[in-house]
Amino acid sequence: MDPILTVLRIGAIERPIGTYGLLLAFGLLVGAVLASRAAWQAKLDVGITIAAMGYTVAGGLAGSYVAFWVVEFLRTGSPMTAIEQPGLVFYGGPLGGGLALYLACRGLGLPFRTLIDVAVHAVPAGHAIGRLGCFFGGCCYGSYWEGPWAIRYTHPIAPASVPPIFRHPTPLYESALLMAFAWTLLLWRPKHVGTGHRAGVYLVGYASIRTVTELFRGDVVRGVYFGMISTSQLISLVLFLAGLAVLWRTRRA
């Protein structure tokens, strides 16, 4: 569990390569490849889909940073923490990325609902890889626990190393659940494509996964309200209800 995968040396210049950043980039690449492959199988234009994926990734990263800024502002009352030590909050990703994908599909002439229905499994698949980056980086860490698979971070730059206690490996919990969710969405072939039904399934499914894994989190940056509900659990509730509304609407249609 090392936040630094390796150090790249070019002459007198040394550049550390972070494990989190590398796995995040790999997760985005895997998600884009899976989405493009799904578009090809659905006989959509692959070139245009790849272009739309570029906008989606950019929108997702922007949304994740904005969400981090909002969370830090609500937690500390000041935007300076988010500016001085920028980070990412996943829930901003689907919101920013989804909006960017919608606008890109409209501009490029892609059927948005069809693309979502055939390629939604790419989101949890890429996210599962990104959570492995959290595990190695020592962020999004778990609460104190001395069970049989408890972990302890000792690397000085890992946020979970302060204090160096045994913890739940919560990023691994979420990564495993996300990968199982991705396989379920991949193997489940809907009767009707283009309704957006599977987007509702994703919202309900991930909101449930996140609500459960948050119970084992121990990092303070996630924010806790009313003494027991985290920021992500509040957002999960909203998205869960939104997912149910999408499912109800598409079922009626």
Image: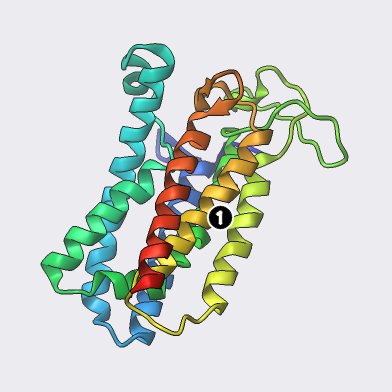
Q: Position of residue 133 (x, y in %)?
A: 55, 45
Residue in the foreground of this view, choosing between 169 and 71: 71
> In this image, 164 relative to 198: left or right?
right
* Image point (64%, 26%), residue name: 218
> In this image, 46 relative to 24: left or right?
left
Task: Look at the picture and state if 28 lies above or below 85.
Answer: below
Query: Can the viewer see residue 202?
Result: yes
Q: Residues within 10 Å of mark 1 (few under 14, many from 20)?
A: many
Task: Look at the picture and state if 51 lies above or below 165.
Answer: below
Location of the N terminus (image quadrant): top right
> In this image, 99 relative to 15: left or right?
left
Query: Can the viewer see residue 27?
Result: no
* Image point (61%, 36%), residue name: 214
Q: Quadrant of residue 243?
A: bottom left
Q: Position of residue 138 (x, y in %)?
A: 61, 33
Residue in the foreground of this view, choosing between 246 and 233: 246
Q: Outermost residue toward the top?
A: 77
Location of the C terminus (image quadrant): bottom left
The amino acid sitting under disc 1 is Ala
- Count of marks, rendered view: 1
Q: Position of residue 99 (x, y in %)?
A: 25, 53
* Image point (36%, 42%), residue name: 92
Task: Look at the picture and state if 34 lies above or below 137.
Answer: below
Task: Look at the picture and state if 8 lies above or below 183.
Answer: above
Look at the image and name its color scheme.
Answer: rainbow
